[in-house]
Amino acid sequence: MDDAGSADGGEGGQADTAAITDTETATGTDTDTDTDTDTDADATTNSQPNCDFCQISTGAEPAAILYEDDQTVAFLDRRPAVRGHTVIIPRTHEEEVLLMDETETAAVFDTVHTVATALESTLETDGFSVFHTSGPLVGTVDHAHVHLVPRFEDDSVGLSLARRELESADAEAIVAAVRDKL
């Protein structure tokens, strides 16, 4: 599985992660018991059979799951930028965060908060980068997800943005256009 937006970087972080990495799950249980339908999606979760993240959320594909509840699953990224790099997904298949309803979005970010708090005390982080990617230019996974990347003083994670001064005319135009849509 190739996870969208995985940043290249060093290991970072010196704290022991045994408590995190020992949570590997490897259930092969097929939770789709609806055999009377010819659809490619589970009706209750909109689970897609060819979506790796849907398979993780149902337990059909193994993952190092840190946390799960009725609406979300948080698991260690298989190609981490640093120790503790976590991916948080909704159980319901949505192609991207911007398409989720308010309840799903709130559940995902509540899980981000819950897991970040645990990672912070476990790994003794110096901070976090939290992000999602959207659209075909930046993503390869068609299931909404948020990256929670612990940051360490000695990491080599590069999440840089080319910066420039905001021109007041540009700001006014953007503010007016966006407010018209809200």
Image (spheres, helix red, strand yellow):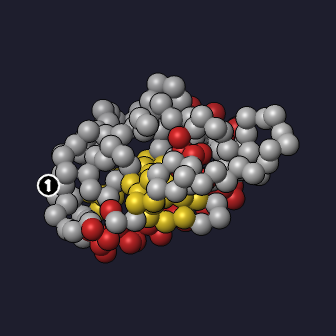
Residue 101 vertical position relative to residue 124 in the rendered view, above or below: above
Residue at (20, 68) in percent of width and height: 15
Looking at the image, the residue that sits furthest to the right is 36
**Is residue 171 something one can see in this rendering?**
no
Please state if 108 lies on the left or on the right of 75 as rendered: right
The quarter of the rendered structure image containing the C terminus is top right
Q: Residue 172: x, y in percent? A: 54, 36
Residue at (57, 46) in percent of width and height: 55
Q: Residue 8: x, y in percent? A: 26, 39
Neighbours of disc 1 within 10 Å: few (<14), some (14-19), many (20+): few
Residue at (64, 38) in percent of width and height: 49
Q: Nearer the viewer, residue 71 or 32?
A: 32
The quarter of the rendered structure image containing the N terminus is top left
Q: Secondary structure at mark 1?
A: loop
Residue at (58, 38) in percent of width and height: 51
Q: Residue type at mark 1? A: Asp
Q: Residue 89: x, y in percent? A: 54, 51
Please state if 37 lies on the left or on the right of 158 as rendered: right
Residue indicated by mark 1:
154
Q: Nearer the viewer, residue 154 or 50?
A: 50
**Is residue 50 something one can see in this rendering?**
yes
Q: In the picture, residue 164 is in which quadrant?
A: top left
Looking at the image, the residue that sits furthest to the bottom is 121
- Total numbered badges shown on the rendered structure: 1
Q: Residue 47: x, y in percent? A: 67, 44
Please state if 97 lies on the left or on the right of 85 as rendered: right
Looking at the image, the residue that sits furthest to the top is 137
Q: Nearer the viewer, residue 130 or 164?
A: 130
Please state if 12 lies on the left or on the right of 19 as rendered: left
Q: Nearer the viewer, residue 179 or 74?
A: 74
Q: In the picture, residue 165 is in which quadrant?
A: top left
